Image: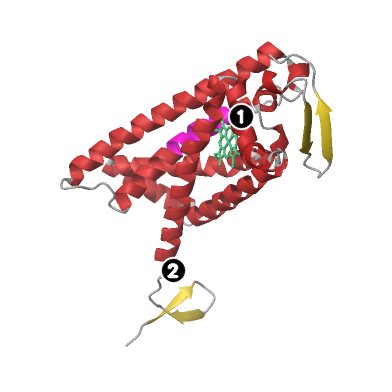
Amino acid sequence: MSRTIDLIADTGIAERARKSRLPAKLDFWQSITGLFLGLFMWGHMVLVSSILFGKNTMYVVTKFFEGKYILGQAYPGLVSVIVAFVFIVFIVHAGLAMRKFPIDYRQYKTFRGHMDMMRHTDTNLWFIQAVTGFAMFFLGSVHLYIMLTHPDQIGPHGSSYRVWFGLMWPLYLVLLFCVELHGGIGLYRLAVKWGWFEGANPRQSRKNLQKLKWGLTAFFLTLGLLSLAAYIKIALYEGEVRLQQPYMPASEQNQPHAGIQPGGEYYLTMQVEEGR
Ligand code: HEM
């Protein structure tokens, strides 16, 4: 006989409790979007760190994503399309993750009580993930919105200008720690949850995974900090006025330049100044 319970407290609305696959499906999508974002962030950090190899290297990377080497001209709008997709995945992931947050002080205290009692590494990691995830709602959205609306200002000069003169460096500093902790823990928890790399001795593989996780987090944090320092160094060395001019490699100087501006306008310029 089925049992009827009062599902919505104090409303008098009673419904039959049913088995539902929805929580499992939502969990699956949370994992998929998290996996995508975690791997994306590793790739993103490698691309951002191209500045460590010089302004020219980062210029080539940004122009590649603007389609210059395939379409013959740079279309910054293409970057906006990629950002829009990442932004949507980011919002979906955040929405799905919100289900797991404590909804009131009582739930929070219960969780903290369990966490203090168990002293279990993976439970502590969950807490770090919830806090950094919450911070990223705000910090990540600011960054993604700027990337979405100003794709033409990504490059050795534009990025250095934004980091230092645009005062983005404090936000990036906090976001960097949040994203590396959150992403590293997230990918580790995914591997444990779905049993990837479990092998014959799950206890030992979990320990190995934890070591790998901290190693990767340390690596990407160092890469991020060094890149941030490189953007700041360029800004201090070149100065505000110079960075407002787009970077142009020596090989492309004294040549006419054509492209489409974000507004759809066609431009043709000639830069004769010597690049640094
Ligand atoms: C397609 C989407 C994205 C693009 C095109 C992009 C692009 C960039 C670029 C060009 C920079 C260099 C600084 C600047 O130009 O302002 C940067 C830095 C940064 N981005 Fe992104 N980003 C994207 C998504 C994200 C996401 C989803 C996060 C995390 C939520 C993130 C976190 C960061 C951090 C922490 C830095 C500073 C890196 C450092 O310390 O060296 N980005 N991003």
Q: Is residue 180 left or right of residue 79?
A: left
Q: Main secondary structure of the magenta part?
A: helix
Amino acid type at mark 1:
Val
Which quadrant: the C terminus?
A: top right
CA gap between label 1 and label 2 equals 45 Å
Tell me residue 186's x, y (percent): 40, 44
Tell me residue 233's x, y (percent): 61, 15
Q: Which residue is mark 2?
A: 22
The residue lying at 79 percent from left, 39 percent from top is 261
Q: Answer above or below: position of 207 versus 82.
A: above
Q: Secondary structure at mark 2?
A: helix
Check the image and tell me how it is coloured. secondary structure
Packing grade of label 2 (10 A; few <14, some 14-19, many >=20) is few
Q: Is residue 176 left or right of residue 269?
A: left
The residue lying at 71 percent from left, 26 percent from top is 166
Q: Are marks 1 and 2 in contact (CB under 8 Å)?
A: no
Q: Determine the quadrant in which ligand 1 lies.
A: top right
Pointer 1 or 2: first along the chain? 2
Residue interval drawn in magenta: 171-182
Q: Is residue 139 left or right of residue 276?
A: left
User: What numbered label is drawn on residue 101?
Assistant: none
Q: Which residue is mark 1?
A: 60
Which is more toward the observer, 165 or 100? Answer: 165
- Choose top left, top right, bottom left or bottom right for residue 275: top right
